[in-house]
Amino acid sequence: MPTALTPANQPRVAALDAVRGVAILCVIATHSLSTMVATTGSYRLPMEVFRALDYGQFGVQLFFVLSGWLMFALHAADRPFTQPYYWSRRWARIWPLWVVFLVISYLVFGVPDSGLPAAVGFVLGLFFLGWLNPALVYIPTGGLTIQQEMGHYLLFSWFRRRSVAFLAVTVIVGYVSMFAARAVVAFDGDGGIAGTIAADWLRLSLFNSWPFFLLGGAAFTVLRIWRTRGVEGLVPERSWTAVLVACALLLAMISTYAQETPGYFVLGFVVIAAAIAVVGNAIPAVGPSLRSIGRYSYFMYFFHFWVLRGIERWYTGPKDTTEPYNLLWVFTIWTIAVASSWAVGLVSWNLFEKRILAWAHRRWPTPKAVVPAAS
């Protein structure tokens, strides 16, 4: 879930904006592929190109890793951690745009048949609880990712000072809960109370996204230790910590994601995409564009769905076309979605989002760093 988490009084890290840019470009590429198929009714693309575009879906996991890195980095400083300060930043960045897209989704695209009164469904959506109902989980479009992101922030606020072993256990417990929930659904169905709760948990699937958030935090922590204490500082002092971390990584690597893709493959994509972003950021002709796209990636994440829906509605081109046409068409779709989402995102940032963030920074200022008393 694309977010800009850097406080107003700290400089933005250019490379991280570039990573955001690559992540959202990957996500839009995957959805552009789906729009190409929907408009032409054809899958005729070179297999390598089709797979490369399809793998762009894992840009979402790259966002999760980036969020984990940023959360651990922003709150590693020697300043008091206060819940009002923490949540004011999270809500000021995410909630206003979320509400705008939720309201427009209800007004323009209609109220989904959730079996609940429309007002109840809307309130659930407002507070990132749409995952409690199958019809509401993707309202607004792409909303599940943001709901998972809010779950990460909630867990981080509870577990930020816990040990490495404890965090590894949370991953293990998460996957154990997945297997348990599947067993409950198979036994109780989705009609009983236990089955409903289990189905809701499986729908949110926080156990699949939380490990990537922690991996981002681990990457930041390892880099910081490496810089200050050298390679020796990376080795856990207690053997049980190493065992728990190994078990957590093993579970994360063999778990499955979209289209039954193993976790180790998704992590490999994340590492390669992040490396491409860092290299691209250093290229004068590429870096500024990536950073600019990354700055507005949160808005682009929502808005590009509407652009693609409009393209599907207004497409009047040929059906069942050849590879060269489809290749040109999917690139055209991707270009239109990226350019239009970026342009509207630029306006949204300057007229709407930035002002709300500035108000939150004034209302809940950054806690001052703790200065040790002189002895």
Image (tube, rainbow, N blue to C red):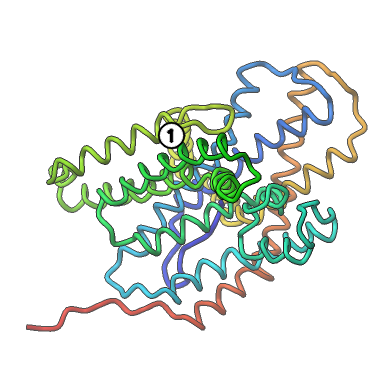
Q: Is residue 260 left or right of residue 370?
A: right
> Furthest-left residue in view?
375
Q: Is residue 21 left or right of residue 326?
A: left
Q: Position of residue 161 (x, y in %)?
A: 29, 62
Q: Is residue 81 left or right of residue 202?
A: left
Q: 82 above or below 243?
A: below
What's the residue type where badge 1 is placed?
Leu
Q: Where is residue 360 in the image (x, y as percent from the top left)?
A: 53, 77
Q: Residue at position x 76%, y 26% from top?
A: 328
> Furthest-right residue in view?
316
Query: 104 and 292: which one is in front?
Result: 104
Q: How many marks?
A: 1
- Classed neighbour count for the residue bearing mark 1: other residues with Cα under 10 Å, few (<14), some (14–19), many (≥20): some
Query: 234 and 272: which one is in front?
Result: 234
Q: In which quarter of the image is the C terminus?
A: bottom left
Give the quarter of the image for residue 321.
top right
Q: 125 above or below 313?
A: below
Query: 246 and 179: which one is in front?
Result: 179
Q: Residue at position x 50%, y 41% from top?
A: 181
Q: Where is residue 76 in the image (x, y as percent from the top left)?
A: 31, 63
Q: 248 above or below 97?
A: above
Name the residue that disc number 1 marks. Answer: 267
Q: Where is residue 288 in the image (x, y as percent from the top left)?
A: 55, 50
Q: Residue at position x 77%, y 49% from top?
A: 306
